[in-house]
Image: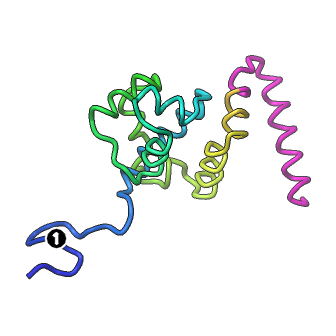
Amino acid sequence: MAKPNQTSNNARPKRDGPHPVDTHVGSRVKLRRMILGMSQDSLGKSLGLTFQQVQKYEKGVNRIGASRLFELSDLLEVPIQYFYDGYGDADSANGFAEPDVAEAFMELVNSPDGVHLCRYFAEIKDPQVKKRVLDLVKSIAETDMGK
């Protein structure tokens, strides 16, 4: 007789939510879409989907099939491996050594302002200007945190 969380003999236990791989792949789709400044609606139209279906992909609620992942890699201009990068890194989430850094990074890249900040910062070519921008942001953050 199957255990309560199993579908049949020797079957894997059922999960209550999305599989962690599906969640990770979906978050990478969202990250890349936002980096490109693309809306869920425009990505959906390119795939023949609604923006709600794209939302479900990005949350990992709906799994992304192999052919759809192939289409996404083309539309988002990344290799297929991009969607799996950082998954299962031994050190911690997203390959960061410090969990707090990983959490702050994911919060940053999951916000439209954070994506814009990263995009425009990457366009600065002068290393001295980049350093001054970082110093400014650090100073503002420390003031805001009451340091």
Residue 119, image x and y in percent?
67, 28
Query: What kind of residue is marked 1?
Result: Thr
Q: Is residue 49 above or below residue 26?
A: above
Report if residue 91 lies within the magenta region.
no
Indicate whether 10 appears above or below 45. below
Quadrant into which the C terminus falls: bottom right
* Residue nearer the viewer, 90 or 84: 84
Quarter of the N terminus within the rendering = bottom left
Q: Residue 115 location in percent, x, y?
A: 66, 36
Residue 34 appears left or right of 7: right
**Residue 118 lies in what quarter of the image?**
top right
Q: Which residue is mark 1?
A: 7
**SS for callout 1:** loop
The residue positioned 64% from the left and 50% from the top of the image is 107
Residue 82 placement (x, y as % from top left)? 42, 33
Q: Main secondary structure of the magenta part?
A: helix
Question: Who is closer to the viewer here, 12 or 43?
Answer: 43
- Image position of 9 with respect to 106: above or below: below
The reply to whether the magenta stretch includes residue 140 is yes
Q: Tell me the magenta residue range.
A: 120-147
Q: Residue at x 38, y 59 (%)?
A: 18
